Amino acid sequence: MVDSLSLGVEYSFIYSLKKDGSLRNNAEQNFGLLNMDYSDKPGFAAVRRVLDFLRSSSRMDTAPEINVLLENARPDEWPVTWDGAKLAAPGSIETHAFIDAEKRPVLVFWSSERAGGDLQPRVADIRIYADWAKSDTVRAQDLWTGETFDLPVKRQGGRVFLKGVTVPDHPIGIVFR
């Protein structure tokens, strides 16, 4: 969803709204945002949070350079095999810049490692080559859990630095105020 909004995709679709089976080991029966009885699965609230967070935002036509420096590389040691091809997760940090209705910069980021793996969240330094922050902290929101937390900001020479940021395998959003 965040990728689609960032790329300006006009229409985006959810593959399956409702879980359509009860076999736990059959992936095709377990897609969807709703259970078979139409109760919410955890992903339903997460999708709602992402949409609420980005509701008044649009993609930045000219986003600044954003560099992410990882403490260590972690290649995918167990790539999924699909039709005979090994598909390894890229292991990079995805970043997408938006602008909200009040003309404030918005950043959404996550680790592109395999979701739900047994790995600890990544730690990274994020450098934004634009003077987005007006204070020494920014408020971030975990778009999976809804938890909010402060991140310390260092500003220098028209750049913003977020140091030692925990980057999970699901989106974190920041509105720079």
Image (cartoon, rainbow, N blue to C red):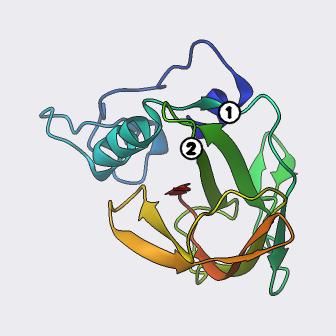
The location of residue 117, given as percent across then percent down, is 57, 72
135 over 93 or under it: above or below: below
Label 2 neighbourhood size at 10 Å, few (<14), some (14-19), many (20+)?
Answer: some
Q: Is residue 40 left or right of residue 106?
A: left
Q: Which residue is mark 2?
A: 104
Q: Which mark is residue 6?
A: 1
Q: Which mark is residue 122?
A: none
140 over 150 or under it: above or below: above
Residue 124 vs residue 114, the one in the foreground: 124
Mark 2 or 1: the one toward you: 2
Which residue does the image show at 55% across and 19% down from the upper left?
12
The location of residue 77, given as percent across then percent down, is 80, 75
Which residue does the image show at 69% across and 44% down from the upper left?
97
147 over 103 or under it: above or below: below
* Quadrant of the image occupied by residue 111: bottom right
Label 1 neighbourhood size at 10 Å, few (<14), some (14-19), many (20+)?
Answer: some
Identify which amino acid the numbered label 1 is placed on: Ser
